[in-house]
Amino acid sequence: MDVTCANCREPWDQYHMRHDAIFDTDLGHSLAKIASNEGTPLSNRNYREALERDGWKFAGNSVLAIARCPACPKDDEPQSEEVKTRVMQRAVLADLLGDDEDGLASMLEDLDGFE
């Protein structure tokens, strides 16, 4: 199941965000392997910080609630009201659904289908 970036609308696979994206960060391979094998909790601070250093930004408490991704344009253009609304919606859903990653991914996919 894909989740999309609120800013550029790039789709990202839920499994990739949970298990594979960590290998693209500056964490050592052994730490990334542990994180990937354990299915790192989506709200884990070290995992999120490593991804944020790599260009990701998240809304709420989950790495599935993507506010900005490495595929986004590098310019720091102010966000439109539409993007701000999508970021806020992702943050609310991530906070409401907590650790229910399948529920969150499903709700985010439904949310994108309504636009």
Image: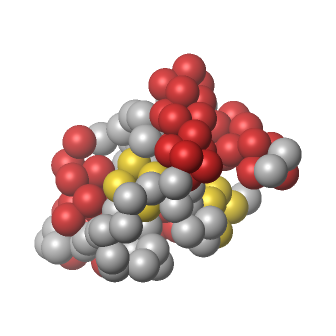
- The reply to whether residue 86 is visible in this rendering is yes
Percent across and percent down for residue 51 are 29, 62
- The reply to whether residue 39 is visible in this rendering is no
Percent across and percent down for residue 23 are 32, 74
* Most foreground residue, 61 or 89: 89
- Residue at 43 percent across and 67 percent down: it is 69
- Residue at 60 percent across and 71 percent down: it is 10
Determine the image quadrant of residue 22.
bottom left
* Residue at far top of view: 96
- Residue at 62 percent across and 60 percent down: it is 4
Q: Is residue 75 left or right of residue 28?
A: right
Percent across and percent down for residue 97 are 58, 25
Location of the N terminus by quadrant is bottom right
Instruction: Name above or below for residue 105 compared with residue 11.
Output: above
* Most foreground residue, 110 or 80: 80
Q: Is residue 83 left or right of residue 60?
A: right
Q: Is residue 109 left or right of residue 4?
A: right
Percent across and percent down for residue 67 are 46, 53
Give the colour scheme of this rendering: secondary structure
- Residue at 42 percent across and 34 percent down: it is 60
* Residue at far right of view: 114
